[in-house]
Image (spheres, rainbow, N blue to C red):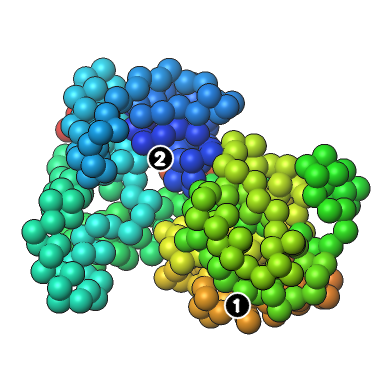
């Protein structure tokens, strides 16, 4: 018997792949749910016009004149009002209280300000900061237990942080991001893609895709590049002003080998052009970009946990190369050198990545959410499973 079609309100700050990993997670998941016949309406400040998934959209308008913490509070209040009636499930990726399903993508606010070590001055000031107090209050409402409500963590790391912040009574199931398997890229296709993108045909092209490349380890990659031969190149997709300034301060021998591309919705050609993926991130609850890189057959170099949550999902040296620390530029340079020279290592990582991809298929992610929705609906109706 076919599952009934659900009316789902999806709440996110901005809807589109170009805005970051959490946003790409939402787009891919809603694509699966819509393809399965469920009726999805997007509630967001912005809907990327270049996004190829077109769903009904209801904008949440918040004026830019307010400071960021006020904008977050206004968004939460307006989203709660807009989704109050007419939907079977409200699925939220935002800090607030509107969701039946609340998906936590980043380090919990309470963990950051009440669990992690802080200086006495910072901890004292946070008690009086309206910004911190607002974020803490919103998160407390977000995770507060109530019938027909679930908190979901996108990685084991986030689930652990939630438990430390709110105690073991907060049970957050982990539903990690998925990925779609890309078509294999031949050497000739890679050459043609580089030519089309205006990239050098020769050399080892390392790729970094990020909305904020500085947080994803760009300075470390530039330091590693300085220790590597001149035919090792770097392509940064998502370059912002801070990353452009960082590259501009690098030595000319490094600067000349770096290619910067602004934020874009169409990242596939850049994965197709690259030889390997570097991700010495300083802060990633999961890390969708290296998972996507694996889907294009790229060997991946990662930060370890707790800096990169995705590192908990791979076997070091079998499915990815994992650094001991995100700022060890010497280790990153050594890992890049190994991948350049060791064909057997590259093939071992590609084979291992196929196992990772099998564990992270989007249809499986959607199935788990639909099971969660069914639990919530049974709970609301008073049916005990």
Residue depicted at 64% across the width and 54% down the height: 236
Q: Which mark is residue 236?
A: none
295 left or right of 119 in image: right
SS assignment at label 1: helix
77 left or right of 282 in image: left
Observer able to see residue 8: no
SS assignment at label 2: helix
Pointer 2 with pointer 1, Cβ within 8 A: no
Residue 341 locus on image (x, y percent)? 83, 75
Count of numbered circles in the view: 2
- Identify the residue under disc 1: 329
Residue depicted at 71% across the width and 47% down the height: 270
Observer able to see residue 138: yes
Residue 41 locus on image (x, y percent)? 39, 22
CA gap, disc 2 to disc 1? 39 Å
Q: Residues within 10 Å of mark 1 (few under 14, many from 20)?
A: many
Give the quadrant of the C terminus. top left
- Identify the residue under disc 2: 369
Using the image, determine if residue 231 lies above or below residue 332.
Answer: above
Classify residue 328 by image quadrant. Answer: bottom right
N-terminal label among 2 and 1: 1
144 left or right of 209 in image: left
Using the image, determine if residue 124 lies above or below residue 291.
Answer: below
């Amino acid at each position: 018997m076919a599952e009934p079609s659900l009316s789902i309100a999806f709440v996110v700050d901005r809807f589109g792949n170009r805005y970051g990993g959490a946003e790409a997670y939402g787009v891919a998941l809603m694509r699966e749910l819509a393809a399965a016949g469920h009726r999805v309406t997007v509630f967001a400040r912005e809907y990327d016009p270049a996004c190829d998934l077109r769903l009904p959209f209801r904008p949440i308008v918040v004026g830019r004149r307010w400071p960021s913490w006020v904008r977050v509070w206004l968004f939460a209040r307006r989203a709660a009002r807009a989704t109050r009636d007419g939907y079977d499930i409200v699925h939220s990726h935002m800090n607030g209280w509107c969701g039946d399903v609340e998906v936590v993508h980043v380090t919990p606010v309470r963990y950051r300000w009440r669990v992690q070590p802080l200086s006495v001055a910072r901890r004292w000031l946070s008690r009086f900061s309206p910004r911190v107090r607002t974020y803490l209050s919103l998160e407390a409402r977000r995770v507060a237990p109530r019938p027909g409500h679930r908190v979901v963590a996108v990685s084991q790391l986030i689930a652990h942080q939630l438990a430390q912040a709110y105690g073991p009574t907060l049970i957050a199931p982990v539903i990690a991001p998925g990925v779609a398997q890309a078509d294999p890229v031949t050497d000739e296709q890679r050459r043609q893609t580089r030519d089309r993108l205006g990239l050098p045909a020769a050399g080892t092209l390392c790729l970094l895709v990020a909305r904020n490349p500085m947080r994803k380890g760009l300075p470390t990659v530039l330091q590693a590049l300085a220790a590597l031969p001149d035919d090792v190149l770097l392509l940064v997709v998502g370059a912002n002003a801070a990353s452009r300034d960082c590259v501009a301060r690098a030595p000319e021998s490094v600067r000349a080998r770096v290619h910067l591309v602004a934020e874009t919705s169409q990242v596939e050609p850049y994965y197709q052009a690259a030889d390997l993926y570097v991700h010495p991130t300083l802060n990633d609850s999961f890390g969708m970009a290296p998972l996507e890189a694996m889907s294009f057959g790229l060997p991946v170099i990662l930060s370890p946990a707790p800096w990169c949550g995705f590192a908990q999902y791979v076997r070091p040296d079998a499915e990815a190369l994992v650094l001991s620390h995100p700022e060890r530029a010497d280790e990153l340079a050594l890992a890049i050198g190994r991948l350049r020279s060791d064909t057997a290592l590259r093939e071992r990582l590609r084979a291992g990545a196929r196992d990772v991809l099998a564990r992270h298929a989007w249809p499986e992610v959607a199935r788990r959410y639909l099971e969660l929705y069914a639990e919530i609906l049974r709970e609301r109706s008073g049916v005990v499973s």
